[in-house]
C-alpha cells in the first residue's frame, strides 16, 4: 500500500445537487418544522471528497455523471469557477442530476433524503479506457456507495490488478459482494456504518475493538478507519485500535464532514503518511469543515488547516 505523491488521486463517484433548509429542530415523522433559511449547494459523496482533495492541493482525476438539466449545468459552472477538473464528468441526455434534500438543526445535526438518479444509472461500460488509464496511473483510487456495486467493483478490480491502493467510503452502508473484501485496502466508515457491518452499537474508539476479529484486518490485508463525529476517529489494523481524539470547534453544519475526512485521509495516504498520521490529518481537515454551512462550501483549503507536525 505504498503511494507516489506525484500521481493523481482518482475518485469515481456521485454528484448531487443539494437543497438545504435550516430548521429550529430536526422534524419527527409527520411534523412540519418552519425553516429559518434555505440554500442550494453542490455535493454528493464522490464530488465532495474529490473537491476536498482538490482544495488540499493534491493532483486529482474525478469521474462522475450528471443529467443534461439546469442542475447539472450549475454543477459544472460552480466547479469550473474554482478550477476543478471537470473533463471526467459525463453529461447524460435524458437522465436527471441527483438531488439531495437536507434539514440542518442549530447544533449542526442533519437529516438527508436523496433522489439518486444519474449516480445509480452509472453503467459498467462507462468505465472506458480513459477512466481505466486514470485508475492505473493513480496514487490511490477512492470510491463510495452512491453508485452501483458493479461499477464500484470494476473500478476496484482495475486498481487492484494495477497494484494501486484502494479506498472505499462504504456509505451509505449496504450488503456488499464478497469480492469487496479482497479488493479494498482502506475502509472508511462512520460509527453507524461500522455498527451495521459489525452488528453492534459503535460510539467510541474502544467499541471498534470488535473489528479486530475481522480476518482481513488480522491478516494485515485491510485497515479500517471509523469516524466518530465530535469524538474523533479510530484506526483499526492488525496491531489493534488507535484512537484519534476529537477536536473541539464551533460546529455549524456537519453535512459533508465525513466526506471531508475521507478526502483528507486519501491525501494523507497519497502523500506517504502512515494510516494513523493520515487519520490525524483527516481529522483536522474535517474539524474545519463543520464550521461553515453546506457540504461542499464548507470543505476547507489547505491553508485553513491547523498547523501540525504532520502537515
Image: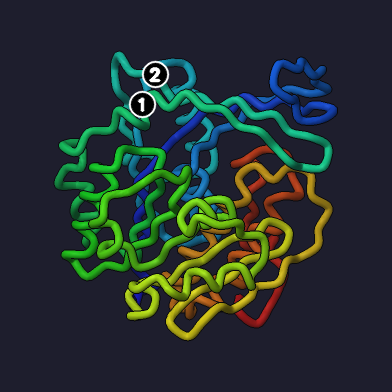
Element on which disc 2 rests: loop
Which of 45 and 204 lies nearest the eye of the viewer? 204
Residue 28 drawn above or below residue 151: above
Left or right for 2, reference 47: left
Residue 266 drawn above or below residue 240: above
Q: Residue at x 23, y 61 (%)?
A: 159
**Could you say which disc has been placed on residue 100 in the image?**
none
Q: Position of residue 294 (x, y in %)?
A: 67, 38
Q: How many other residues sit within 10 Å of disc 1, few (<14), some (14-19) or many (≥20)?
A: many
Q: Are marks 2 and 1 in contact (CB under 8 Å)?
A: yes
Q: Residue at x 72, y 63 (%)?
A: 231
Residue 118 drawn above or below residue 15: above
Which of 253 and 26 lies nearest the eye of the viewer? 26
Left or right for 121, reference 22: left
**Could you say which disc has been placed on residue 118 in the image?**
1
Q: Residue at x 60, y 32 (%)?
A: 112
Q: Say which quarter of the image contains residue 190.
A: bottom right
Residue 206 visible here = yes
Q: Position of residue 125 (x, y in %)?
A: 15, 37
Q: Position of residue 246 (x, y in %)?
A: 73, 66
Farthest residue toward the bottom? 239
Residue 84 visible here = no
Q: How many other residues sit within 10 Å of disc 2, few (<14), some (14-19) or many (≥20)?
A: many
Q: Quadrant of the N terminus?
A: bottom left
Q: Say which quarter of the image contains residue 160.
A: bottom left
Number of marks in picture: 2
Residue that badge 2 annotates: 96
Dot 2 or dot 1, earlier in sequence? 2
Q: Position of residue 180 (x, y in %)?
A: 28, 57
Q: Residue at x 38, y 43 (%)?
A: 13
Element on which disc 1 rests: helix
Amino acid at each position: 500500500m505504498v503511494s507516489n505523491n506525484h500521481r493523481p488521486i482518482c475518485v469515481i463517484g456521485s454528484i448531487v445537487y443539494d437543497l438545504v433548509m435550516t430548521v429550529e429542530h430536526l422534524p419527527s415523522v409527520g411534523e412540519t418544522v418552519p425553516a429559518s433559511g434555505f440554500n442550494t449547494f453542490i455535493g454528493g459523496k464522490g464530488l465532495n471528497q474529490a473537491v476536498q482533495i482538490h482544495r488540499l492541493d493534491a493532483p486529482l482525476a474525478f469521474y462522475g455523471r450528471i443529467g443534461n438539466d439546469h442542475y447539472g449545468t450549475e454543477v459544472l459552472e460552480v466547479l469550473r469557477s474554482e478550477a476543478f477538473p471537470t473533463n471526467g464528468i459525463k453529461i447524460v441526455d435524458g437522465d436527471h442530476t441527483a438531488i439531495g434534500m437536507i434539514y440542518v438543526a442549530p447544533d449542526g445535526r442533519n437529516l438527508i433524503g436523496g433522489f439518486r438518479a444519474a449516480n445509480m444509472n452509472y453503467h459498467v461500460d462507462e468505465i472506458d479506457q480513459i477512466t481505466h488509464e486514470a485508475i492505473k496511473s493513480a496514487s490511490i483510487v477512492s470510491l463510495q456507495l452512491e453508485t452501483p456495486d458493479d461499477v464500484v467493483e470494476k473500478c476496484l478490480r482495475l486498481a487492484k490488478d494495477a497494484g494501486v491502493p484502494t479506498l472505499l467510503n462504504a456509505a451509505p452502508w449496504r450488503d456488499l459482494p464478497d469480492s469487496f473484501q479482497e479488493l479494498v485496502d482502506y475502509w472508511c466508515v462512520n460509527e453507524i456504518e461500522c455498527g451495521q457491518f459489525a452488528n453492534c452499537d459503535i460510539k467510541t474508539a474502544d467499541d471498534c475493538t470488535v473489528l479486530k476479529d475481522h480476518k482481513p484486518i488480522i491478516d494485515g490485508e485491510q485497515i479500517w478507519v471509523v469516524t466518530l463525529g465530535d469524538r474523533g476517529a479510530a484506526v483499526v489494523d492488525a496491531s489493534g485500535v488507535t484512537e484519534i481524539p476529537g477536536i473541539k470547534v464551533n460546529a455549524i453544519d456537519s453535512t459533508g464532514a465525513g466526506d471531508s475526512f475521507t478526502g483528507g485521509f486519501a491525501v494523507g495516504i497519497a502523500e506517504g503518511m502512515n494510516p494513523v498520521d493520515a487519520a490525524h490529518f483527516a481529522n483536522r481537515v474535517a474539524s474545519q469543515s463543520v464550521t461553515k454551512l453546506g457540504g461542499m462550501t464548507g470543505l476547507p483549503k489547505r491553508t485553513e488547516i491547523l498547523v501540525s507536525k504532520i502537515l
